[in-house]
Image: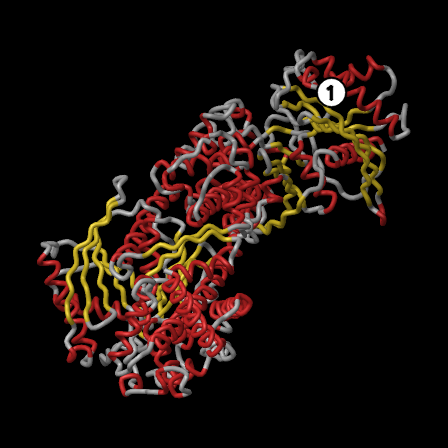
Amino acid sequence: MIASHLLAYLFAELNQDVVQRVDKYLYHMRLSDDTLQEISARFRKEMEKGLGVETNPTAAVKMLPTFVRSTPDGTEEGDFLALDLGGTNFRVLRVKVADNGSKKVEMENQIYPIPDEIMQGSGTQLFDHIAGCLASFMEQLQIKDRMLPLGFTFSFPCYQNKLDESILVTWTKGFKCSGVEGRDVVSLLRRAIKKRGDFDIDIVAVVNDTVGTMMTCGYDDHNCEVGLIIGTGSNACYMEEMRHIDLVEGDEGRMCVNMEWGAFGDDGVLNDIRTEYDRDIDMGSLNPGKQLFEKMISGMYMGELVRLILVKMAKEKLIFDGRRPSGLLTTGHFETRYVSAIEKEKDGLQKAHEILTKLGLEPTHKDCVATQRICEIVSTRSANLCGAALAAVLRRIKENKGLDRLRSTVGVDGTVYKKHPHFARRLHKTVQRLLPDCSIRFVRSEDGSGKGAAMVTAVAYRLAAQHKARQKILDPLRLSLQQLLEVKKRMRQEMERGLAKESHAEATVKMLPTYVCATPDGTEKGDFLALDLGGTNFRVLLVRIRSGTRRSVEMHNKIYAIPQDVMQGTGDELFDHIVHCIADFLEYMGMKGVSLPLGFTFSFPCQQNNLDEAILLKWTKGFNASGCEGEDVVGLLKDAIHRRDEFDLDVVAVVNDTVGTMMTCGYEDPLCEVGLIVGTGSNACYMEEMKNVELVEGDEGRMCVNMEWGAFGDNGCLDDFRTKFDVAVDENSLNPGKQRYEKMISGMYLGEIVRNILIDFTKQGLLFRGRISERLKTRGIFETKFLSQIESDRLALLQVRSILQHLGLESTCDDSIIVKEVCTVIARRAAQLCGAGMAAVVDKIRENRGLDFLKVTVGVDGTLYKLHPHFSSVMHETVKLLSPKCEVAFLQSEDGSGKGAALITAVACRIREAGQH
């Protein structure tokens, strides 16, 4: 008993001794984690070179765009054909993908040989042969009369410009067909099929086997975004952000990049890592100086590396007693499958004995242990190098997504990965060590080149069908020039109806006279008070206007809250509260008892009968103070001032905020005669000829008309432009049937229109994988500020995803692109409709004055106009297009409701004084 233990111990010691000697001898090939991190960093740099348009031509790692823009989402379905050409045999497959909840994939395939004379013949012969085999396969399955989509796996070096176009760079793997290099293989196949004339197919995609691997695994695991092959050769692909792929137009979304990583090191960046054995292998290969990384890691060279090491160690008499029989000296005699056999736990040493004997050696136990250790070192180095490059890819994906921790899946294929007893485990461990902040799952691919090609085709088909369905829904929201001209024409008709005495009562665009008869001329001066009441807060302002060479406007203001009980109480309580606030402000400014002219911005629907008289038609915005509707608000304010009996104020003007906007800009630019607000709500005003304002006596001069244009369309005149989404938003609003134009263009409603479209898309399975979250069903959740953020050019899709996440919407990259597209369509339509309205206004001013050409400025305010990244430019463009005889400038207003009210008061005082002299 003791003897057998002793023997085992001595045996283990002996083995350990041999292992240590081999480790020492091959220490160059044993890479530390620091070295692997360094290699990973170098690989990352090479990736960036390949992606850059300037550095790509000289880059070793080519990073080829594949035009595969999406991975499977599990909803793919249909009947597909696949062709797999990559060696002396080629396969034709029929792949049925079913999405009936079971996600089933059924495959039938047939293998056809390619005779030598065809491999070495002309391209025409090759593609005629392929078309012939395809015909017989379809006949066999009785599907010749159907036009099925086909995916083509073509595993040769190619350059792609489109998903269905692939230009062969050079033949490899023993093929030498003439007239194919430099040409598109899809066109050649199409031509061969057309020449036969007995069937037709739709070639949708050309795929590289690595991409096929990723797509096959992606069908079962939606996190799969990397494909890896380690077999005879080695390559990888992954989903890269479009904004980083300089070789392809466009920044939206992602695209799979075929890295062609076998060429890593061809520019010398691995010279310090490569050993004399790597150099020997390269020198003896068919393509010296090329694919250096592949030669260090792939199955084609692993056995040969082991053989070269055995020969050198034998030469130095470290093994085999220095014997080197011809079997050992023959290139290629030590096959890679031997490496796998020798490294098996149980009978590895026995296998080593058998294989070495077959090569003409008489190996001792020590020789077998040494050979096993050499195999371990070579295959471990391969797994480590592969892991270092893969870690660079995964780290890049993690940074692209801006994540603290990446969860991702790698789809893998290849004989080394699948058949070597320890390779997969070593690779996984290396990636884990180099990327501790990532959770990476490895999934074995089944038939990447066949099923994968069908999957790429299925995804392309799904995307095309979904795109078509989405465009059909969005098309009614895209307005043509003809339609915009029609909107402009109808707005003009409604304006005329609002101005005319006879039709005014029925008109929806009310065209209210404001009694503001002039814009600032720059001579205004003095101190003025302004009140601004339009919401739950209320402002009192002191505005000091200086004229002459040092023209300036200086403002002081204080904001006061209006308590809920005051908003809902009596009119007397509300106006007493306002006067109390004015008294407090005058004291705060040290002006107690001073009587100043006052302008009152009162942003509620009113009928003005004079500049200082406004009858409140109805409360809005949550106000409901009794005894005010139908009364003159200036009278109510004056009564409250008398009740307090502390000071007296000269209420000169009651103003609407749109008019205030025009006046504020008019102070800066004398050509400003139009005011526009596009914020939460929307409205416009402009200087109309008095002779056209039939509601007011007199024909001389001009008067500003408050259009109240939000109600355009309330009589049904926009019904042919409204979509089912506009109708839904209107029906669920607080004032159904009212302010229809405003609901199509203003900030308060755009987010809601978008939300309704997103729900419609999701119900039809065109978004969020058909899953509607509770959050998406919530009204008002999609705020208009999100539209501005999502459409910002500076925002990557990453941030779009985080906005959607904040809304509780789990989105893919494709979902983000779709949401962005919907936001763009809705904001663009709003800006165009607003521009069409504005074009009607400026053209009316031009025609009023009998001019061939008008130069005019529009003063603009409102959050949508100011904050949305594209609204203003689209609106300007539209006005230019629809009113070519007007040169329209747009000027942003600062504080139209405060400063504007003071300026109207100042202009009125100026005119009043001029009248007194």
* Residue 781 position within the rendered picture, expressed as x and y whole percent measured from the top left: 52, 33
User: Residue 651 versus residue 846: which sits nearer the camera?
Assistant: 651
The residue sitting at 46% across, 36% down in the picture is 755
Q: To which quarter of the image does residue 586 belong?
A: top right
- Looking at the image, which is closer to me, 218 or 388? 388
Q: Is residue 838 left or right of residue 142?
A: right
What x and y, as percent, mark residue 910? 80, 35
| One can see residue 172 in this view | no
- Residue at x 78%, y 44% (from the top left corner): 522
Which structural element holds mark 1? helix
Specify the quadrant that holds the N terminus. bottom left
Check disc 1 and give the amino acid type.
Answer: Val
Give the labeled residue for mark 1.
634
541 relative position to 468: left or right: right
Tell whether 849 sits left or right of 3. Answer: right
Residue 635 visible somewhere in the drawing: yes
Nearer to the camera, 691 or 54: 54
x then y, percent, for residue 68: 36, 58
The chosen color scheme is secondary structure
The mark tally for this picture is: 1
Q: Quadrant of the C terminus?
A: top right
Residue 831, relative to residue 781: is it above or below?
below
| Image: 210 above or below 836 | below
Q: Please report the residue visible at 35 percent of the width from the left and 54 percent of the height from the top.
A: 443
Q: Position of residue 730 (x, y in %)?
A: 46, 28
Look at the picture and state if 454 lies above or below 90.
above
**Residue neighbourhood size for the residue with mark 1, other residues' Cα within 10 Å, grouped as few (<14), some (14–19), many (≥20):** some
Query: Going 45% across and 41% down the picture, which residue do you hit?
Result: 810
Query: Of all residues shown, which one is farthest toward the front?
Result: 2
